[in-house]
Image (tube, helix red, strand yellow):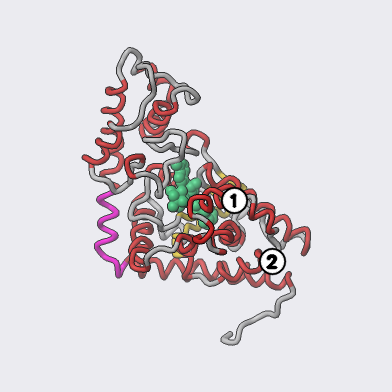
Amino acid sequence: MPQPPLRVFSGIQPTADSLHLGNYLGALRQWVSLQDDYDCVYSVVDLHALTVGPDPAALRQRVRATAAQFLAAGVDPDRSILFVQSQVPQHAQLTWLLNCVAGFGEASRMTQFKDKAAKLGDKAITVGLFDYPVLMAADILLYDANLVPVGEDQRQHLELSRTLAARLNSRFGEGAAVVPEPLIVKATAKIHDLQEPSAKMSKTGHPAGIIELLDDPKTIAKRVKAAVTDSGSEIAWDPANKPGIANLLSIYSALTGRPVGQIVEDYSGKLYGHLKADLAEAVIEALRPFRERTALYLDDPGQLDQLLRTGAGRAEALARVVYQRIAARFGLAQGTASR
Ligand code: ATP
Ligand code: LTN
């Protein structure tokens, strides 16, 4: 008997007007190719973005901008389900159930929470920020996802999702939840900040350290040329001692498909400046069509909203069944007043 295709789920937060090269190479690019072999569900996770208290008008705009970029990258709404998290109420509902099986200590150990909390200070930390990884687990379990393509920074959150799924199965019996596997592509799992190569490139990082997917060619060239390089002048693959150059080589290799070793050979005897000039050109050319396609989707917000509503309807049809299955295992009464 042929098996049904495995299910993939992933999400990106609408926390900026533009995604960056880390989001693209670490996650979004994999999302697109996975569509050929898997049953994919992709979400603009706006409930997650609420954890940093965004301005409502900015959030509304960024939800559309993020969805437009998914589409521009090649997420195909006919083959995959593309939707906005808050339009499917079961995400919040399942989060509550998982809150009641997740350990307080377990959630307290999440390094991303600890880092963000340290930056925000005691007064600004919300319960939502603390609960962020449980909401992420709900996203994944709600679709019985088998595979979750993300960057390296999400590994610990994924591990928590796996733990919670396994706990449902041991508490309520097998079949309560599917235990998901992370899909982290090693070569692009962590794209580094151009100004601070020890940190990951992040939407909330220093602007000069980021290449945004919607940046114009001039800005891209400026950012690449100003990237921090390392002492010495030899172009070599040495992530421990030359993290700045290693980052540029990783990006170049990921965009051109040429192995790092071959690039290093090509640039033997050349200067950092040569590599930067060619890399800037490669990034500009890779992103030009992407920027144009994003603008087309954003030109027609009515159509984009309609496409997202259709996606939410398809997502909810799946989520309702799984939510009811899990809620029943907890012993909750079935049905709602309206149905
Ligand atoms: P923020 O800075 O707002 O926390 P972010 O830039 O980390 O955001 P997310 O929405 O949290 O972006 O991440 C979306 C996806 O991009 C996730 O799969 C994440 O692992 C991946 N990702 C983010 N930054 C990088 C990076 N520098 N390298 C590789 N993958 C990344
Ligand atoms: N926390 C993730 C975004 C996210 C996610 C998900 C990723 C929310 N829910 C479910 C994969 C699966 C991040 O990248 N910051």
Query: Viewer-proximal residue, 120 or 145?
Result: 120
Q: Nearer the viewer, residue 112 or 271?
A: 112
Residue 207 is left or right of residue 127, and the answer is: left
What segment carries the magenta color? 291-303
Mark 1 C-beta to ligand 2 under 8 Å: yes
Is 311 on the left or on the right of 94, as rendered? left
* Residue at (66, 52) in percent of width and height: 162
Task: Label 1: state its secondary structure.
Answer: helix
Residue bearing the label numbered 2? 100
Question: Which residue appears at 33% of the width and 55% of the height?
Answer: 17
**Residue 85 seen:** yes
Q: Residue tagged by mark 1? A: 157
Q: Is residue 52 magenta?
A: no
Q: Position of residue 247 (x, y in %)?
A: 42, 31
- For residue 323, above or below residue 256: below
* Crowd class of label 2 (few under 14; some 14 to 19; many from 20; radius 10 Å): few
- Name the magenta segment's main secondary structure: helix
Q: Measuring from the top left, give residue 328's x and y in whole percent.
A: 71, 73
Q: Residues within 10 Å of mark 1 (few under 14, many from 20)?
A: many
* Rendering quarter of residue 296: bottom left
